[in-house]
């Protein structure tokens, strides 16, 4: 993969996170699904914002967080995602470039404003999200630069983008371009309710186009409609080259061929905010894959990166990840 | 003071902080004064933003932070400050209301955009600021609601607002209204370079209009052009009812009549970001004054509130301050 200009190119939502501490009563009162992601229109988004507490704004987006993590690890990521030419769009663009991700999508001059994700963090460090996709929902094939996809070792697709039809079309285009150039395709399932909405098509995507699959326990159980994790693990076996299945504090299981490798979670002093944990696991894992590491090492890198973001507010690394993993990769 | 609807009304800059980790070399390269505040126009602000790292956006403004602290302590603060009807203005307005500060200034429909303060935080927890005042620089007497000033126990003035002439006029108007209603007037000197720019007028303001003065070591030495802190302490004595002089890790000295009370700093596990330390000291102190506490108790409350914000990124409390000071105020 040394002939590629980029290690990984991510396709995903380009949104700014609006993060505030909250509690279960507030989440219940506003009809949100705790620990999950609910899509909202402008009106619902404004209403929740008006009701929630003082917040912190930080760039977010699942695949964008993963690309930020890869940059922080010293890798070479690129990103495609759609913002408007407004203040939040400027914030998103500044932050992703500042951490070292190649991002050249020009902001849209019309249409919906830049998307935002209201994130309520409870005392148990769990995050509950309400997302107004905005400009991000209009992401389509024209936002994907084939030359960059051909020049990236891995094309990484964010499951959340499976809701809008033009973004699904962009996925297939990117996957075909990547494979035609001899590259690999990775997919994160993102959310079990998103899997519910698109189960059949996601299974086809995994079978026909995905080399590396990321899913948590709920998502993989939902994808294959199995009774439990063990059954889901059997169901995914052989359907793609690598499936990295995350299980929160139980660590992860990496399924490849006949192997099923268990990797422990990295201990966290105090879990503050789990936002971005899955995104950063994928960052560490993909960085390992890009550098020819063993699957066990890839899982370890994922665990270390996930633990870093769990320890603080926000979904992107607060310290250079390359320093944190120096021992592992040294 | 129990007849007042508000404990304190603050007049200050209404700006959003854009906070990023940085280092001394970057600060030197961009011609900034480490630990200080430099004013910038749009061009300089955009240039620095383009060069700085991934950032976090949080509502700021010195007096606004102080009012947020008083709300977090369970007090009744109000605030006057000027934003535009743009995205950052919406963020500022949301956050200050969400924490419980009375803020009814309608956003300006024209003129400069909402101000922002780029804050570079170095490893030593020191913060270096570059401020684009924007809409805030157009704050004037018309932004002060006399009825609210008459109905607040203390009117609190932010020294940073001494730069634009219309804001100075607003200060005098508010001070006169407060005193005519039998209220008290407090002033924070904010920055030693700001004191340099307006020394004569600030001395007149202190002598003629201020009951409670907040200043750090550099600011009080600059105001009276003395050789050292001890001489400045002598110089300020008798010029106002109370002078609360902060000395970072050495705590504070409260000068009132013939007294000079020393109060220790509250220990901090790990200093992360000193942004807002002075603002939150003032919050604790004024909350004590509003509730008839002794000057020693006021100083203690100030120290505890300052320690809380020093322990994390950002200039506003991350936990309810009323819980932190429960023992002190029992």
Image (tube, coloured by chain):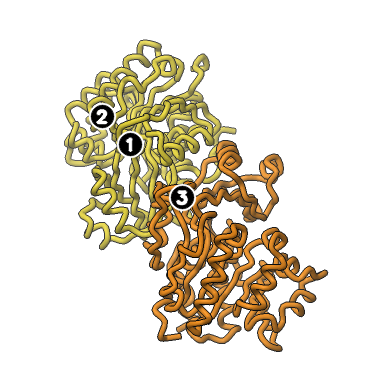
Chain colours: A orange, B yellow
Secondary structure beneath dot 1 equals strand
Q: Nearer the viewer, residue B237 or A176?
A: A176
Residue projecting furthest to the right: A227
Residue A9 placement (x, y as % from top left): 47, 72
Left or right: A55 in relation to B18: right
User: Residue drawn at (49%, 38%), measured in percent from left and top?
Assistant: B95
Q: Identify residue for label 3.
A: B267
Q: Are marks 3 and 1 in contact (CB under 8 Å)?
A: no
Q: Chain of mark 1?
A: B
Horizontal side, residue B88 vs residue B231: left or right: right
Q: Residues within 10 Å of mark 1 (few under 14, many from 20)?
A: many
Give residue B245's mark. Answer: 1
Q: Chain of mark 3?
A: B
Residue A283 in view: no
Mark 2 vs 3: CB contact within 8 A: no
Where's the C terminus of chain B, which quadrant? top right
Compared with B302, B21 (above or below) is below
Distance of label 3 from label 1 (alpha carbons): 18 Å
Residue closest to the eye, A225 or B243:
A225
The image quadrant that residue B140 belongs to is top left
Which mark, by number, is residue B236?
Answer: 2
Above or below B267: residue A304: below
Say whether mark 3 and mark 2 are on the same chain: yes
Q: Are marks 1 and 2 in contact (CB under 8 Å)?
A: yes
Give the mark, 2 or 3, whose residue is nearer the N terminus. 2
Q: Earlier in the sequence, mark 3 or mark 1?
A: 1
């Amino acid at each position: 993969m040394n002939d590629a200009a980029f290690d990984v190119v991510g396709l995903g939502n380009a949104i700014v996170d609006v993060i505030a501490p909250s509690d279960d009563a507030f989440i219940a009162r506003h009809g949100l699904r705790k620990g999950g992601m609910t899509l909202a229109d402008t009106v619902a988004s404004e209403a929740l914002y008006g009701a929630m507490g003082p917040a912190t704004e930080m760039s977010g987006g699942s695949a964008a967080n993963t690309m930020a993590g890869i940059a922080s690890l010293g890798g070479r990521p690129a990103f495609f995602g759609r913002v408007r030419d407004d203040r939040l769009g400027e914030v998103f663009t500044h932050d992703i470039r500042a951490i070292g991700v190649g991002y050249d999508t020009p902001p849209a001059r019309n249409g919906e404003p830049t998307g935002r994700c209201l994130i309520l963090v409870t005392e148990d460090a769990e995050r509950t999200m309400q997302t107004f996709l905005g400009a991000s929902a209009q992401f389509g094939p024209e936002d994907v630069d084939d030359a960059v996809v051909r020049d990236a070792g891995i094309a990484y697709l964010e499951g959340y983008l499976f809701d809008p039809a033009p973004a699904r079309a962009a996925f297939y285009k990117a996957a075909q371009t990547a494979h035609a150039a001899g590259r690999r395709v990775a997919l994160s399932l993102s959310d079990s309710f998103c899997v519910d909405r698109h189960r059949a098509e996601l299974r086809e995507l995994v079978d026909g186009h995905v080399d590396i699959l990321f899913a948590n326990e709920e998502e993989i159980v939902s994808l294959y409609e199995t009774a439990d994790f063990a059954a889901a693990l059997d169901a995914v076996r052989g359907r793609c080259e690598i499936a990295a299945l995350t299980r929160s504090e139980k660590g992860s299981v990496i399924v490849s061929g006949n192997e099923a490798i268990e990797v422990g979670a990295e201990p966290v002093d105090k879990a503050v905010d789990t936002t971005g944990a899955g995104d950063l696991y994928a960052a560490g894992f993909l960085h390992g894959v890009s550098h020819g590491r063993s699957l066990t090492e890839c899982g370890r890198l994922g665990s270390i990166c996930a633990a870093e973001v769990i320890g603080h507010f926000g979904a992107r690394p607060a310290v250079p990840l390359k320093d944190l993993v120096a021992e592992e990769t040294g």
